[in-house]
Image (cartoon, coloured by chain):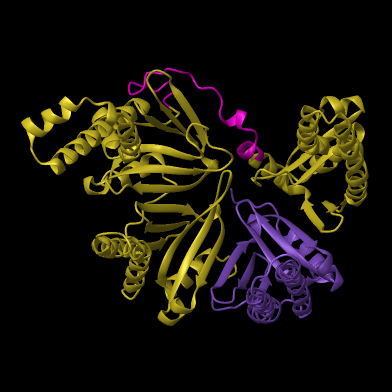
Chain colours: A yellow, B purple
Amino acid sequence: MIPLATLKAIPYLLAPLAVVVFQRFAEGNFLQALFIFAAGIGVLLVGILPFQVLSWAYYTYRFEAGYLHIKQGVIFKKERSIKRERVQTVNITRGIIQRLFGLAGLQVETAGGGAESELSLDAVTLEEAYRIKRNLEGSAERGGDAAGEETSGEKATWGIDAVIETALPVRQKAGAVEEESPSEAETVYQASYPELFLAGATSGGFLVLFSILGVIFSQVAPYIPETFWEFLLEQVTSIAAVTIALVVFVLLLLSWIISTVTFVVQHANFTLRRSQDRLQISWGIIEQKQLALNLNRLQALAIHEGIIRQPFGRCALIAEVAGGGSKEQNYVTLLFPLLRNSELPGFLEKILPEYRLPSEMVPLPRRALRRYIFRAVALSLLVIIPLQWAPYGWLAFLLLIPAFFWGRSRYYAGGTAVDEQQLSFRFRFINRFRVLMRRNCIQSFQVSVNPFQRWWNLRTVRAWVLSSPEGKSFQVTDTEQEEASRLWEWYSRTK
Amino acid sequence: MEIEPKEKLDPRALKAWFFSGLLWGLLLMIVPVAYFILNNLFWNLPLFYGWLGAGAVVLFILWEAVIIPKLKLHFWRYEIREEEIDIRHGVFIIRRTLIPMVRVQHVDTEHGPVMRLFNLATLRISTAATNHRIPALSREKAAELRGEISALARVSDEDV
């Protein structure tokens, strides 16, 4: 392990060393280059090796009554105990170097725990690796029936993605799905083209595109022939300001059309189907993409109402997924691009009966309104005050009006609800979200209070769910104190 | 929520935090001291800025090593129940956190050189999504709690 760890550390140190040596070499200072090189290697051996020896000596593990204890650290000590039942997988890996020395690497992982392995050994003898594996996995196979089942059950859930994301029959004709076996109930939803078009038109993607087009235009503008501008000024309008507005309008329209078409093409044939405890999402025309999702990996459901979509009464459905979402969808998985708000309860009932849309939510108390408005106004002042040094800076005070309405609408968006198994938050930053979390999927829960909130009897509630690659939290600010207590009692298992 | 957690941190935390605050302060003190030395040797700038820096560092030590540890110790509470861990901490913003035992992935104890000097350790509790710490417990207590929590944190029949 020591030589291996040292070998692993060398490349990091060699790179800067090589740069310096090459620089000297290029300057013609051969002797100096050689000296620095030798000194570098010396430091490497004297500095790294003893530290590696020590960290090797201090890294110990032992088994004791169903536990794996790990101790590590030279200066900063760390001890960890892992219960055997918690262990999900024990991987034995053998690289070239490890094989050369008859060694093996070993990683022990527990359910869901982030990117880092609970125990990771670089070099143990192969027999030792198998001994650890036997010790950790043995109990699950031989142990009591209940424990064994639990472990294997969770393994199926959490196991390697390859198991879950098995290849599906590609290019299944969506929409015209005949039930292959009537016993297997399957619910299918497909986004229609008009709806997709509306989704694209209101996605807000055009704002990004507009800023890109704007930059491109500002680069191209000098090359547009003078005659064109003259034509615009003479034939269309004689006011320069109107010309500018016209150009902006054309750019906006262009970016809006492009982004809408792109969205429709990207999400064409968007189909969501539910069969037993699996969700299958497929989309795309040219390249059909599919994603299969075991329901156990679904950690929370978010209903996203984009600010442009809200007036149309439409929302999108987003899933927080544990254990790695598809790469294309970047961990947050789009379950359905556009739904009518009125359709939502029926949609959920059919495709995800595990989640229920709360019919009523507890709104924020009236006295929270001033705090929301205060925060919005304070934030806008951060922009307004520096602008006072600019010409026409006083115009910036007009920003106070949208800030006021922003704070107000954030206040009205805030809300919480619980039923037997589900916690629901409603909140807005710009877009409005409704997040539905099942009690079993909430990793921890927090109620916090600052001095001002204490004065007004208000609280902030926050819940964490597992969402790859790390946890994610959702919060509602300035809820009624009693409501926060109620949520706390609901989550608490101590009655 | 009405039942506040009962357990407090080890009072030796005060000494340990004072010590580490002092160490950080002394480390920071290098900056004004270096200013004085360099000023003496090479530059001829007003000494005022040096004193200002030194004063700021002293204030920092006072805050970080004396005031904050007292407040922190005063507000810190935790309780380990059969089904959950209840933590209350914070000086200005007070946070109550609830971690169900069935969500606990693993428990660590850790201690650096300063903590070791005062026979203290930090307990770190990890769920699949979050990390929580109970700082400054006696080392025996921390080890005991680590054993207790990892025994209670059994795999549940609840699905994750």
For the question of whether residue A192 can be seen, the reply is no
Front residue of A25 and A394: A25
Give the total number of marks visible in the rendering.
0
Magenta range is A155-182
Q: Give left or right: position of A26 versus A407.
A: right
Q: Position of residue A377 (x, y in %)?
A: 33, 67
- The answer to whether B10 is drawn above or below residue A420 in the figure is below
For the question of whether residue A18 can be seen, the reply is yes
Residue at the image point whose x is 50% and y is 37% from the top: A330
- The answer to whether B92 is drawn above or below residue A160 in the figure is below
Q: Position of residue A21 (x, y in %)?
A: 81, 33
Q: Give left or right: position of A430 versus A441.
A: left
Q: Quadrant of the C terminus of chain A?
A: bottom right
Q: Give left or right: position of A362 versus A235.
A: right
Front residue of A33 and B60: A33
- The answer to whether A468 is drawn above or below residue A424 in the figure is above
Residue at the image point whose x is 41% and y is 38% from the top: A335
The question of residue A161 being in magenta is answered with yes
Residue A217 quadrant: top left
Residue A110 quadrant: top right
Q: Position of residue A182 (x, y in %)?
A: 41, 25
Q: Position of residue A436 (x, y in %)?
A: 43, 52
Residue at the image point whose x is 76% and y is 37% from the top: A16
**Main SS, magenta residues:** loop
The question of residue B70 being in magenta is answered with no
Residue at the image point whose x is 75% and y is 79% from the top: B14
Q: Quadrant of the N terminus of chain A?
A: top right
Q: Give left or right: position of B9 versus B87.
A: right
